[in-house]
Image (cartoon, rainbow, N blue to C red):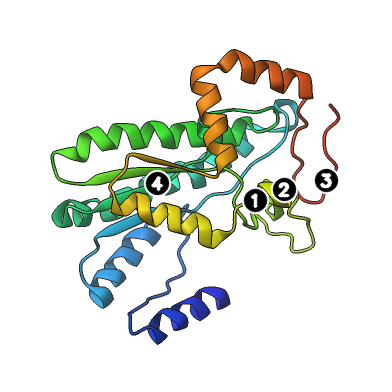
Amino acid sequence: MDRLEKLAADVRDLGRRALVLPCDVTAEGDLDRAAARTRETLGRIDVVVANAGFGVMGPLETLTLGDYRRQFETNVFGVLRTVYATLEDVKRARGRLVLLGSVSGHLALPGASAYAMSKFAVRGLAEALAHELASRGVAVTLVSPGLVESEMRQVDNRGRWHAEAARGSPKALVVPVATAARHIVRAVARRRREAVITRHGKLAVFLQRHAPWLVRKVVGRLGARSRSQPGRAAAPE
């Protein structure tokens, strides 16, 4: 909350309005109350971004049905709760609905089955809603990031943040938040159907679409490791 309040203060310093509301996307009613408070304070809702998410990691044998349910509760049903809470707003405004997917919604890797399943589901939802809402003037944009600077790798399979955990991704492949944000804003302003963020992300999606055999070969050759959750060692190859 402290960082959000600071961001809100920066926005207000620019002469704009900002509202910070704590909200749990897995809790029934939270998003409806947040949307109502937003209307009361800021007026019409034109753009909605469903961004909440985390990654449940590990090989199938180490995960439970509860792990998969927990992943979907945030990454899929959290998105749906956001959509339901604001759908009438964006239809009235002929606005924009932005769903955060992932390159993992195109390409599933070992040790990321739960996360990939959730992002494949979000991609399917985005594609369907783009058709359903087109006649109402609503643009649906799916954002599929690759490696973007974040604290996601410091969050364990139960959604708990570990400040001491390393972020893990090679710095050369990680795109700064400001750069990713510019790409997202541009895609939303242009009402694009999808924006794949990062060059390596675009390459991965292209190869998966046009040369899936090559992707399978590369993944098999590399013997990709399962990404471990914070506080646990990586699974053996």
| 179 or 95, nearer to the observer | 179
**Residue at which label 1 appears:** 174
Please, what is the three-letter code of the amino acid marked with disc 3?
A: Arg
Name the mark nearer the viewer: 4 or 3. 4
Secondary structure beneath label 1: loop
Please, what is the three-letter code of the amino acid marked with disc 4?
A: Leu
**Vertical position of residue 188 compared to residue 233: above or below:** below
Q: Is residue 69 visible?
A: no
Q: Earlier in the sequence, mark 1 or mark 2?
A: 2
Secondary structure beneath label 4: strand
Name the mark nearer the viewer: 1 or 3. 1
The x, y position of residue 72, in whole percent, is 51, 39
Name the mark nearer the viewer: 4 or 1. 1
| 40 or 16, nearer to the observer | 16
Residue 232 - label: 3
Mark pair 4, 1: CA separation = 21 Å
Do callouts 1 and 2 mark residues in contact (Cβ within 8 Å)?
Answer: yes
| 227 or 195, nearer to the observer | 195
